[in-house]
Image (cartoon, rainbow, N blue to C red):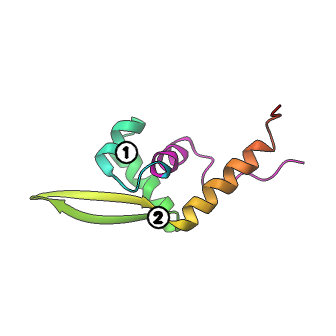
Amino acid sequence: MFRELNPLLHSELRLAVMSLLLSVEEADFVYIREQTGATAGNLSVQIDKLRQAGYVEVTKTFKGKLPCTLCRMTPQGVDAFEEYVESLKSYIKLK
């Protein structure tokens, strides 16, 4: 029986962002953009969707005089990601 895949996480860029954030305590916007190869505009929109869903916490701060946007996965985001992975496994025949 197949489990429904979370449509919010079933986007290549949002899934990449969540995968990155799962392995670090937090990451800044520039790092995420470099790792995903996304444009700043598209990444900003996708991070905001994850923030609105409660999966990512976004903090705007400064490094010296330069603005810095930090992203961190929330406990709800971790749960959603783990559930997505479990759902994905229902489509894969693992031996």
Q: Quadrant of the C terminus?
A: top right
Q: Amino acid at mark 2?
A: Arg
Q: Amino acid at mark 1?
A: Ile
Where residue 87 appears, x then y in whole percent?
A: 75, 50
Where residue 91 appears, x then y in whole percent?
A: 80, 40
Foreground disc of the pair 1, 2 = 1
Q: Is residue 36 left or right of residue 3?
A: left
Q: Name the residue at 32% across, 50% down.
A: 29
Q: Is residue 3 left or right of residue 85?
A: right
Q: Is residue 64 left or right of residue 56?
A: left
| Nearest to N terminus: mark 1 or mark 2 | 1
Q: Name the residue at 37% across, 64% down.
A: 58
SS state under label 1 = helix
Q: Nearer the viewer, residue 46 or 90?
A: 90
Q: Which residues are magenta?
A: 1-21
The residue where tag 2 is placed is 51
SS state under label 2 = helix
- Occupied quadrant, residue 12: top right
Residue 35 vertical placement versus 77 (above, below): above
Q: Residues within 10 Å of mark 2 (few under 14, many from 20)?
A: some
The residue where tag 1 is placed is 32
Q: CA distance from mark 1 to mark 2?
A: 15 Å
Q: Nearer the viewer, residue 25 or 8?
A: 25
Q: Is residue 40 visible?
A: yes
Residue 16 highlighted magenta (yes or no): yes
Q: Is residue 53 visible?
A: no
